[in-house]
Image (tube, rainbow, N blue to C red):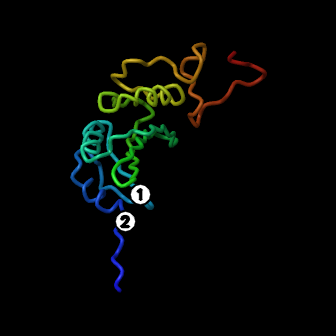
């Protein structure tokens, strides 16, 4: 009896993703059921719309990452066959702005507010940009997940 080769579930998805508009480079499988893709702020909505069209309809998280010289916003989507796509978009630290994706994924607003609170990334077009995690009295321009942020010293508090 000859065993039928098992096709990893992400292989057909990677092949289908090659036709998604707005990707900056071909998607890559990083491990079982995990795919990484890259886009730009200018083509972000095209890429997310294309991923949504091929079955990635659940936005499970948005992560903001301080890479030192730049930020990266990572959109985590789950879709067909239990595959998760992490779509990375670079954001310059000198002008940390990227479009909101709430028209495609309404839940994105919460994640975008979190990224703004902690890293200072502005999501252009976000209807509700109130603080989400930090209290209203938190000092403006202080973003605690930035690599260059220093907490207050000498017994100072933000309470």
Which of the two labelled residues, at mark 2 and mark 1, occupies the earlier sequence position?
2
Residue at 40% of width from left, 31% of height from top? 108
Residue at 41% of width from left, 57% of height from top? 33
Can you identify the residue that label 1 sits on?
33
Q: Residue furthest front?
A: 1
Above or below: residue 60 compared with residue 37: above
Q: Residue furthest bottom?
A: 1
Specify few, some or many for label 1: CA neighbours under 10 Å numbering under 14, 14-19, or 20 or more.
Answer: some
Residue at 37% of width from left, 45% of height from top? 87
Specify few, some or many for label 2: CA neighbours under 10 Å numbering under 14, 14-19, or 20 or more.
Answer: few
Can you identify the residue that label 2 sits on?
8
Residue 118: image location, x then y, percent: 54, 29
In which quadrant of the rendered image does the C terminus lie? Answer: top right
* Quadrant of res 95: top left
Q: Is residue 152 left or right of residue 139?
A: right
Residue at 33% of width from left, 55% of height from top? 27
* Quadrant of res 45: top left
């Amino acid at each position: 009896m000859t065993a039928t080769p098992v096709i990893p579930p992400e292989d057909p998805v990677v092949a289908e993703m090659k036709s998604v508009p707005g990707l900056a480079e071909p998607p890559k499988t990083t491990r079982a059921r995990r795919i990484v893709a890259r886009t730009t702020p200018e083509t972000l909505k095209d890429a997310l719309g294309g991923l949504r069209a091929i079955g990635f309809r659940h936005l499970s998280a948005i992560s903001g990452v301080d890479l030192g010289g730049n930020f990266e916003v990572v959109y985590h989507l789950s879709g067909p066959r239990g595959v998760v796509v992490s779509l990375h978009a670079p954001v310059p630290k000198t002008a940390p702005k990227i479009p909101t994706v709430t028209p495609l994924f309404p839940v994105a607003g919460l994640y975008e507010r979190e990224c703004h609170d902690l890293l200072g990334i502005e999501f252009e077009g976000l209807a509700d940009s109130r603080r989400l995690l930090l209290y209203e009295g938190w000092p403006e321009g202080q973003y605690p997940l930035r690599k260059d942020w220093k907490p207050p010293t000498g017994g100072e508090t933000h309470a």
